[in-house]
Amino acid sequence: MKYVLAGASGLLGKALARDLVANGHQVLRLVRRAPGTPEELRWDPSRGELDAGALGDPDVLVNLAGANIGRPWTPTYRLTIRESRVATTATLAEVVKQLDRRPVLITQSGVGGYGTDLGDRILTEDSELGDGFLADVVRLWEGALEPAQAAGSRVAALRTGVVLDNKAPAFQLLSLPFRMGLGGRLGSGRQYFPVVSLTDWIRSVRFVAENDGVSGPVNVALPTPATNLEFTEALSMALHRPAFVPVPASLMKAALGEFAWELLGSKRALPTRLQSNGFTFHHPTVTAAISAALS
């Protein structure tokens, strides 16, 4: 199959591209600079510019582009977070309409779309999107797929939890206090904390691309949701480090502002659509996912 990847320079994009090439697929990477190889194609999503003719005949378009949400959400940076996701998805959706054969269009999304704090409520792909900045971003982000869907393309939005890998900035940030002997739960620790191993995230992308019955929102998170306390205990055991220094919610809110709710808020998301279509996880528990990330 021929894949076109946007956001191929990030951790997820590089890992996905390596896996696809290793399994015999063709990968064309979209870049915003002058292409350095025949496997790269320049585009400018801020202007909606992408040469449809230069794509050839792709089977799958995957959008992984998006500014880091772990920075302070100033008014200017909120715009950057939103536009880096919406403009890229919209550009790909418009290009789909120009192709003779409609490819599958997959965009990364996030479980933050369900809202800031949902307690013990089970969240499936049929659950409504919630309130908050990231929920609003997800509405626009996934809504940008509509032109491609209307043109007859199968579209999917991967509502992904935190992807665990030793090289992932989010996992490095979460594990650093433990490596220093200062780890602990975040806030009460009772909040559900959706995560997934990098291996299963890659397998999820390929599964969605290759299975015609999968479309729309797709939760990508452990089938056995873990609380932050359970995550903390599993990480502590895996690193052979204590976990006796909890981080107060008030301190996190003061330091991180609204972003703190992405760590303190509870999201008990289940990968219902993946599993109902036959997907099985290699790392179905938080212990297995953390072990895979550290290996």
Image: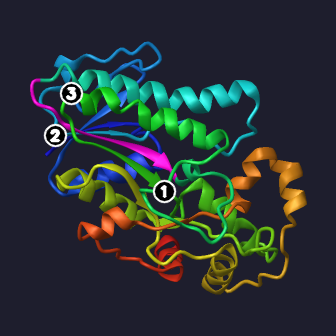
Q: Is disc 2 placed on a helix, strand or loop?
A: loop
Q: Which residue is mark 1?
A: 127
Of 76 and 111, which appears nearest the observer?
111
State the mark number for residue 59: 2
Specify whether 68 is left or right of 143: right
Q: Residues within 10 Å of mark 1 (few under 14, many from 20)?
A: few
For disc 3, the marked residue is 151
Q: Is residue 101 magenta?
A: yes
Tell me the SS state at disc 3.
loop
Neighbor class of circle 3 (other Cα within 10 Å; few <14, some 14-19, many 20+) is some
Rendered image quadrant of residue 6: top left
* Left or right of 49, for residue 131: right
Tell me whether the residue at label 3 lies in contact with that at label 1, contact meaning CB atoms closer than 8 angstroms: no
Q: Amino acid at mark 2?
A: Asp
Q: Is residue 68 visible?
A: no
- Asked if residue 206 can be seen in this view, the reply is yes
Amino acid bearing label 1: Ser
Quarter where residue 276 is shown:
bottom left
Q: Quadrant of residue 207?
A: bottom left
Nearest-to-viewer mark from 3 and 2? 3
Q: In the image, which residues are magenta? A: 100-110
Distance from label 3 to label 1 (Cα)? 26 Å
* Relative to 44, residue 223 above or below: below
Going 74% across and 74% down the picture, which residue do you hit? 189
